[in-house]
Every structure is written in structure tokens, then in C-alpha cells.
Image (spheres, rainbow, N blue to C red):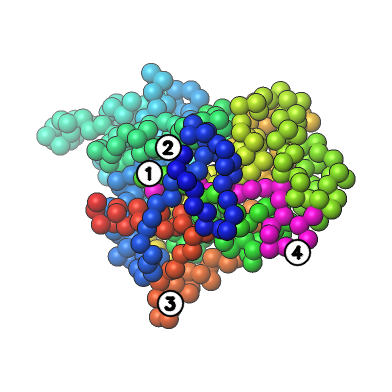
Amino acid sequence: MTKYESRYGVDARIDPDASVDSPDRKFPDIDYEAKIFDDQEKYFSEEYRKQEWDRLWTKIWHIAGRVSDLDKAGDYFTYELGAESFIVTRTGDGDIKAYYNVCHHRGNRLVHDNYGNVKSFVCSFHSWTWNLDGSLKKITDRETFDEDLVCDNPALTEVRCDLWGGFIFISMNDDVEPLIDFLGELPAVLQNYNMDDMILVSDVETDWPVNWKTVLDAFMEGYHAHITHPELLTMIDDFHFQHDVFSNGHSRMHIPMGLVSPRKSDRGKLSDEMREIIESIGMDASQYEGKASDIRADIPAAKRKWAKKYGNDYGHFTDSQLSDDWNVNIFPNITFNMHPEAVLVMRFRPHATDPERCLYDFWVLARKVSDPNYYLPAYMGVPKEADLSGNAPRSERTYGKWGEVSFGPVVDQDAATVPFVQKGLRSRAFKGARYSQQEMRLTHFYIEYDRYLKGE
């Protein structure tokens, strides 16, 4: 193994002894030229918004939704990205296909609901109809059209579609690389989580008054935790993160939980927040009074025992996957906060016309457990009464505006801060971002982002 050069004064690797095949291993850092990212216009410029659409969003793979929303033939959901809308459906042959959500007659959107089930797609304006496989089924009063106008029998315009981790990815680029190649190292690194079998238990969409990158940036580094999320300092080591950068702009950071921040003078004090977390997985909090920093080492065994009680085998997870929060970015606009029992998925979508607005999607995926006494640990933000059996109807999507929906204290604190960042980015005094090594994922992200915008 290549000698690891710590940037934090101590060895910040999650497992210094991890083998080259272990998902815990430290991936090599990439040496980037230190520079100020002085293109702050990308956070508010209409020109950048248009370039992103032409050179990024229309070229790349992105997550449209979950396979679990398409159980049977005719099931569909819609996915909105910028000014475009897509229909993702399961055909009569069992295939999953994705189409632009547009009628070839006069441009009406064929589907107006978030999800549902149909035998065919019927335009609500003039009743042109398409089959589930995208082929044209009927043109109403076809005999009144000049045959030259309709002889092509226009099928729905299909977009590339592929699956991984229970997610449905689409791409508007006919020449896009295979999804598995785009994902690079991630499938192997994340395979233990088996997200294919997880169910959606929370689905929230909100409109935020910031550029999509402004809010994404906040969830790509832990440097701000000490001032923005002070309560986290009693639960995590916010300084010694392991940062890993992967191919194609993807990255992750390991957030060590069950520790007290080195910024705190009393690292043995057990906080109420930490007490609630460990008690929810069956640990005796009284054993850690005055020695809170011992908690992390004991979480893996406790969580394996807790999971087995409810019929889950956590034997294949590494200790880090059981104790820590794995924060993963799928370039460009997805973050995962990963735990064996559940995954928080955040998706950041550009607004159709305003570069200083975005859509923030908040999903929670949970492992199915039939025991009615089971509930997710508090850090997932899911009510204890949530049905996790997999037999309940799909969680309904809820909508809201920034400041009107609570996502729990941590996300709410970020939500309160990022609009001020958005305003400051417009200041003539601001000459560009200067990233520390604690923000190396942002450096990695924007190097890849620049490649796309330059057409590389």
C-alpha cells in the first residue's frame, strides 16, 4: 500500500490496516494545483445556467427515481429536470423505459401526475395515444391530416435508461458512456448496503432560494460543522474525516460517529443526543458517562446484535459502515448519507429558469423490517410509527418552500445559512473560493464540473 501522508497531524484513515479490497480503504489523494476558484458567476449567472444545461445536464447520467415505483406493467412516474419532463414506466414486457413527456402533435405534456398506472399514454388535449413501449397507438381523426404529416407514426422520444442500487438513471445523451463505467469505483465500494432492497419511507420536494451548487457545497464538507452544527461536536469527530475522491467527479467522506470532537475540552462528556442514539440500538448509556469517546469502538458489536434481534444480518458490514456516516457524492447532484439500516438521499436539481433557485429533494430509504416494535435510529429523522414492513403504500410525496419544511436540526441549520452564502457570492469584494484540505471534495467536484463546461 502506498504510504499515506496525513494532512491533519494524525492518521485520519478509518482503518489504517484496511486491505486493498476493503471498502474502508483510503483511496489515493489527487494533487491539484492550489488556486482560487474565481468563477463565482457560476452560482448566479444566466449564461452559466445555459452552459450547464447544454454541456452538463444533457450529457450525463442522473437519478430519476426508484425501481420500486414501477412494480407492474403500466406503472409510471414523472421526473422533472430544468425545463424538461420525463415519463419513466414499466412496459407490458416488463422493461423499464424513459421518454420525454411531450405529445408530438402540439407539445402538450402527456402526463401531469407524479406517478400512477395506465394502459397507454393519452394526450389530454386531442387524445393522441401511445403504447407503453412508446409506439404510436392512435391519432384521433387521422383521416383529416395530410398523410405526409403523420406517415412517420411518431413514437415517444426515448432517453437512455439504466439501473443500479434500486435507482433508475436516465441520460439525454445518446452517446453517454455505460452507467456502470460512469459510476466507476462506487458499485464495489457500496455493495454491502444493498440499496436495491430498501424501501422509500420519506419523499419531500422543496424549492430553495439558492443555486443548486450553493446548497450541494454545504453537504460536501464537514469544515462548517463546528460553527453551524455545534450539537454535532458531541457526536462526531468533525476534524479527522477520511476523504476519498474517485473517477468521474464522485467522492466520499467518512464521518466518524460515536466520538466527541477534538475541538471540545471535555471529550468524555456524554450528550443527550448521543445518549438517545446509542440507547436506540440497545446500548447502555450509563456505561459511558464520562467516557463518551469510547462509544464508537463498541457500536459495531451493539448494532450487529440489535439488527439480529429484528431479523437482519449485519455480519458483512465493516465496523466503519456500522459506526460511521458514509457521505457519498454521485456527480453531479446526489449525496448519500449511508447507514446499514437506512440511507438519506439528497438530490439537487436546477430551476428551469432562475439560476438562483433550485429544487431540493429529500428521500429516506430504509431496510425492510416486519417487527412492529422496530424503528429507525433518531439520526434518520423518520417517525417511530413509520411502517417499514414493505407492505405499506408508497410514501406520498410532500411539497414545500424553503423555510416552511423542517428536515431536522442539521439540515435546517444549513437551510438557514446558504441563502446568505448565495447573497455574498454576488459581492464585488468576493474574489473566489479558497478550499482547504477539509474541502478537497469541492476541489475535485469543480475540476470535473469545469471539464464538462469546457466541453471536454
- Above or below — where is 107 with respect to 145? below
Q: Residues within 10 Å of mark 4 (few under 14, many from 20)?
A: few
- Whether the residues at callouts 3 and 1 have beta carbons within 8 Å, the answer is no
Image coordinates for residue 82, horizontal then vertical, percent: 38, 52
Q: Residues within 10 Å of mark 3 (few under 14, many from 20)?
A: few
- State the SS at label 4: loop
Residue 374, image quadrant: top right
- State the SS at label 3: loop
Residue 259 part of the magenta segment: yes
Image coordinates for residue 335, horizontal then vertical, percent: 51, 47
Magenta-drawn segment: 249-268
Q: Which amino acid, mark 3?
A: Phe
Q: Disc 3 designates what residue?
A: 430
Residue pictured at 29% horizontal, 37% vertical? 177
Q: Disc 2 designates what residue?
A: 185
Q: Which amino acid, mark 2?
A: Glu
Visible residue check, residue 409? no
**What's the distance in space between the residues labelled 2 and 4, CA to CA?**
39 Å
| Label 3 or label 1, whichever comes before in sequence order | 1
Q: Which amino acid, mark 1?
A: Ser
- Above or below — where is 146 with respect to 4? above
Q: Disc 1 designates what residue?
A: 247
Task: Tell us which disc is closer to us: 1 or 4.
Answer: 4
Task: Tell us which disc is closer to us: 2 or 3.
Answer: 2
- Whether the residues at callouts 1 and 2 have beta carbons within 8 Å, the answer is yes
Q: Which amino acid, mark 4?
A: Ser
Q: Disc 4 designates what residue?
A: 265
